[in-house]
Amino acid sequence: MDGFPNLPLIFNFFPESQGKISWISLGEFPTPIQKLEKLGARLGLNQLYCKRDDLTHSQYGGNKVRKLEFLLAEAKKLNKKFLLTLGAWGSNHILATTFFGKQLGLKTIAIMVPQPAQEYARKNILITYALGCELNYAKINLAVPAKIIKIYLNGLFKREPPYFIWAGGSNPLGTLGYVNAGLEIGEQVKKGILPEPDYIFCAVGSCGTFTGLVLGIKRAGLKSKVLGVRVYEKWASNAKSAYRLGKRALALLKARGAKLSDLKISLSDFLVLHQYAGKGYAHFTKVGVEAMKMAYELEGIKLEGTYTGKALSALIDLAGKNELKNKVALFINSYNSNPIEKIAPVLPDWRELPKEFHHCFLEQILEPEE
């Protein structure tokens, strides 16, 4: 799209790791940069850009594709037949894992935790089920470890233990997908596709996207500050969690042969904005919904209320306070903007789901919060 080879740039920057880190092509890279002229004019910003990671795949885009290129390749290398992963019952990650796993002959088993009822979540779980995912419900987060052990032991008994993928694909291997995205931004700056950003805005949930961007931007030699906008609970989405994940990702790279003498990180590299999360995950905020409307009406860009709407609301708020005046700002659209109905044209009735998921369709949809 911008003239780079589809092989991950991470292998150009860490050539010693090629062949030692599994990778399979799933997406379409590099994703384009779009200058947001109309939105920038509305906000008083002359240099506002969007990296269109909603276009990582023609059927199901978004940030999960980058992570799954590494994770599913590892699962195939280990000759796994099953994937075990976690997320909320409306999880985009579980849907993406199920969709791409199925293409590679891998069946997904999911453990799902509660979240507020939202229309997108209902659609996601129906499509995930239609694609053949095995759904398991955990009423509280504390019940998750026991379910993981039970499913894993059951697979071990059948001599087919599943390949485990952490929530959001945010383990050290999955994080490499966004190290690659940071390197990609660096190359796009070199090619003059966009000026070097002063600030890069992205949503922070399970920390993999945010952490990988910080590492990739640093390795690319950019001075850009990555601002993570928290959308999940503070105990999980914070600078310390991202920093720890970053250290583990660097340890993985080093173990796979990469030379890292020029790549060092500190806690201060991980800047997380906490004030835009609202009451928590999937609790839409009015400013987030307004940000969604502005992005679509002015630029034709589709966002959603759980992640990207909140991330853009932070950018809009800081612009309104003149904190981005004369700065170059880059927004990461990590949402899939493709109509997902096309990947499963025939959906089940919600009553066909396991009974413990029926409440997802009986609870009232939450209104956006102040």
Image (cartoon, grey):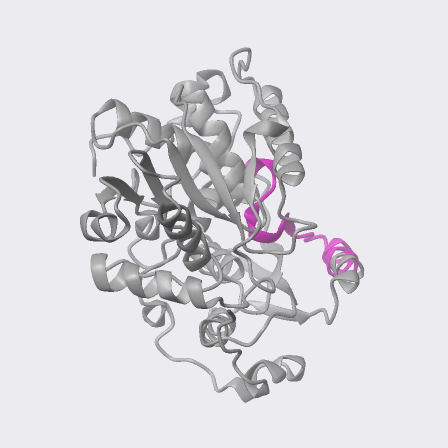
Query: Left or right of 254: which side holds 212?
Result: left
Please state which of residues 348 and 333 is positioned toward the viewer in this rendering: 333
Which residue: 67% across, 81% down?
356
Query: Left or right of 317: which side holds 230?
Result: right
- Residue 342 lies in quadrant: bottom left
Which residue: 59% across, 85% down?
363
Which residue: 46% across, 50% down?
64
Query: Left or right of 119: which side holds 88?
Result: right
Q: How many marks?
A: 0
- In the picture as drawn, the residue positioned furthest to the top comes out as 261
Residue 253 lies, with reference to residue 333, above or below; the image says: above
Residue 176 visible in the picture: no
Residue 43 lies, with reference to residue 108, above or below; the image says: above
**Residue 123 rendering spot, x and y as whole percentages:** 45, 75
Please state which of residues 78 and 299 is positioned toward the viewer in this rendering: 299
Q: Which residues are magenta?
A: 149-173
**Residue 107 rendering spot, x and y as whole percentages:** 55, 60
**Residue 135 rendering spot, x and y as whole percentages:** 62, 70
